[in-house]
Image (spheres, grey):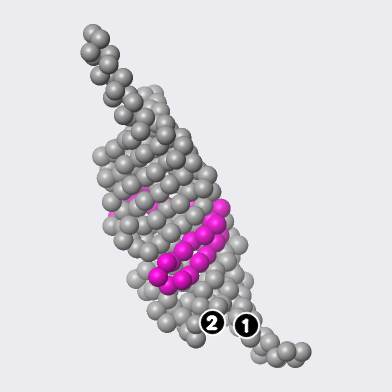
Amino acid sequence: MRKRTVLLAIIFLMFLATCVFSKGAMELFADKLLYNPEDGTITAEGNVNVKGDDMFAEAKRGKASADGSKMELEEKVIIKSVKDPMLIECQRAEAVLVKGGREITCLKVKRFLHETKGVTMKAEKVIGLLKEGVFDYIKAFGNVEANMKDKNGKPIKVTSQSAYYDSKEGTVLFKGQAVAVTEDRIVEAQEFTYYLADGKIKAEGSTKVIFNLGNQEKTE
């Protein structure tokens, strides 16, 4: 009886440190893990880390289903795809296994970074689909702000109501009251398409350009 009690205690202590899920090959690490048998959820507190075959993540707190098909992370959340150079920093995130991949939803996104292309964005909400460690697409909504470089390597800032990153096309589409600001001009349009490969930008719909000519302004 005593040996059984000791064994159960050891297993319980191990469970407080790490938990392995069957679905999606996910591992959950934290200072403290609590299992609720009533609803089959696991609550994680303190230095939460997630390691999977498609993503890495860290946060202050988290909650997951017992099979790992759904996970919620809160406070200082960082999510990084395994094969794609993508990193998202946000206040709250949810990862759910869906047909064809894992859907990631992030709220109050402080930074969405494409590391190799040098594109940094922030928004109120971001939804992305991970497929085999690569973000197939990412949709950003609400007060979208992006910093990147144009085809000449000069900094450019774009603001819009929404944005759509398409990995297959290699583009970021900005829509809704889109404004692009560079050192020498301000461009307003219904939408902008930014090409990651060469930094080109295409403006479409009611385009307006304001050139900075010192004390003079020229509008087209």
Q: Mark 2 — residue?
A: 154
> Which amino acid lies under the numbered mark 1 shown in the image of this protein?
Glu
Taking the view exactly as shown, the residue that stands out farthest to the right is 215
Q: Position of residue 69 (x, y in %)?
A: 34, 42
Taking the view exactly as shown, the residue that stands out farthest to the top is 1
> Which amino acid lies under the numbered mark 2 shown in the image of this protein?
Lys
Total labels drawn: 2
Q: Determine the residue positioned at 54% across, 71% down.
A: 147
Left or right, residue 122 beside residue 104: right
Q: Determine the residue positioned at 49% across, 55% down.
A: 89
Give the SS element for disc 2: loop
Left or right, residue 79 beside residue 140: left
Give the SS element for disc 1: loop
Q: Position of residue 71 (x, y in %)?
A: 40, 42
- Which quarter of the image is occupied by the N terminus? top left
Residue 188 vs residue 116, the one in the foreground? 116
Residue 199 inside the magenta-drawn segment:
no
Label 1 Cα neighbours within 10 Å, binned few <14 / some 14-19 / many ≥20? few
- Which quarter of the image is occupied by the C terminus? bottom right
Residue 13 vs residue 201, the one in the foreground? 13
Residue 187 in view, yes or no: no
Q: Are marks 2 and 1 in contact (CB under 8 Å)?
A: yes
Q: Mark 1 — residue?
A: 183
Q: Earlier in the sequence, mark 2 or mark 1?
A: 2
Residue 192 - label: none
Q: Is 151 located above or below residue 33 in the figure?
A: below
Residue 111 inside the magenta-drawn segment:
yes
Q: Position of residue 124 (x, y in %)?
A: 57, 56
Range of the magenta residues?
96-123
Q: Position of residue 128 (x, y in %)?
A: 42, 58
Left or right, residue 215 beside residue 191: right
